Image (cartoon, helix red, strand yellow):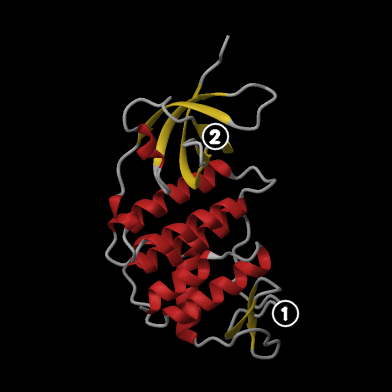
Amino acid sequence: MRRYTVTDGVVIKRHALPSGDLVVTLLGRLGKWRAVARKGTLPGGNVGRLSLFHDVTVQFYRRKDEDLALLTQVQLNGALPGLSDTNTYPYAHLLCELADALTVDVHLEARVYDYLTSGLRGLASHHDPELVALLYAWRLLGVAGLAPRLAACVACGTPAPLVALDVAAGGLTCDRDRSGPALTAAEVGELRLLVSGGMAEALASEMPRRDRHWGLLEAYVTYHVRELRSFAAAAHAGAA
């Protein structure tokens, strides 16, 4: 007898096969898993609900010896049409790729899923999707326990002034122990706001040096997580 499971998840990867079947990777509170929608088995236009970045509720079953779950029903949990826009897509791709990278061999899926869905909704609704992407990328790192230490120098513990970000050490450094990209006092304040400040305050800020913050974020993620291909498109979208 088939045992069906119903759960929520975000489509973070999608691959159409020549056969017409669709293979997707979903990230949800119960974990990250791969599933297949067989051609002609889903009712109506349900396959269209499995677009990238969609937050869906799915019904599926899996045989013990199979890697792929078989999807039997898909329900969309609120449409986010703005994510397909060329100005927003690169940021959604970045958040999904980062969430994917952060959920390898660790059990962080529930908290990562909550932040990812919140970030995707923010991208679709906020007037400044680039700022949303920067903010939520740092918050996803925080969920994974990888947030940089910004309160005091990571080398000697002095609280101020802090003038550089030592990517390898994972935090700010003072002038005496300076290591890594130099930062102005304003950039230090902005970085603190992105990493651990109030969400509303961060989303209301200007942050004129976006290119600077993209460089810091990419260097940090590359060192502490892995290289993400989506950074190039996200940084280019911000510069456009």
User: Disc count in the image?
Assistant: 2
Q: In the rendered image, which quarter contains the N terminus? A: top right
User: Tag 2's secondary structure?
Assistant: strand
Q: Position of residue 123 (x, y in %)?
A: 35, 58
Q: Position of residue 10 (x, y in %)?
A: 46, 43
State the residue in front, 32 or 183.
32
State the residue in front, 225 or 174.
225
Instruction: Confirm or deny contact between disc 1 and disc 2 (CB under 8 A).
Output: no
User: Tag 1's secondary structure?
Assistant: loop
Picture quadrant where residue 152 is located: bottom right
Q: Residue furthest bottom?
A: 176
Query: Quick check: can you spot residue 115?
Result: yes
Q: Earlier in the sequence, mark 1 or mark 2?
A: 2
* Residue located at (41% from left, 54% from top): 119
Q: Is residue 237 above or below residue 57?
A: below
Question: Which of the two marks, 1 or 2, is nearer to us in this view?
Answer: 2
Residue type, label 1: Cys
Q: Kindly identify which residue carries mark 2.
A: 35
* Residue located at (38% from left, 68% from top): 130
Q: Position of residue 17 (x, y in %)?
A: 52, 41
Residue type, label 2: Ala
State the residue in front, 200 or 85.
85
State the residue in front, 150 or 11.
11
Q: What's the distance in space between the residues labelled 1 and 2, CA to CA?
A: 49 Å
Question: Which disc number belongs to residue 59?
Answer: none
Query: Quick check: can you spot residue 26?
Result: no
Q: Kindly identify which residue carries mark 1.
A: 156
Q: Is residue 17 above or below residue 92?
A: above
Q: Is residue 107 above or below residue 96?
A: above
* Residue located at (61% from left, 54% from top): 101
Q: Is residue 14 left or right of residue 161?
A: left
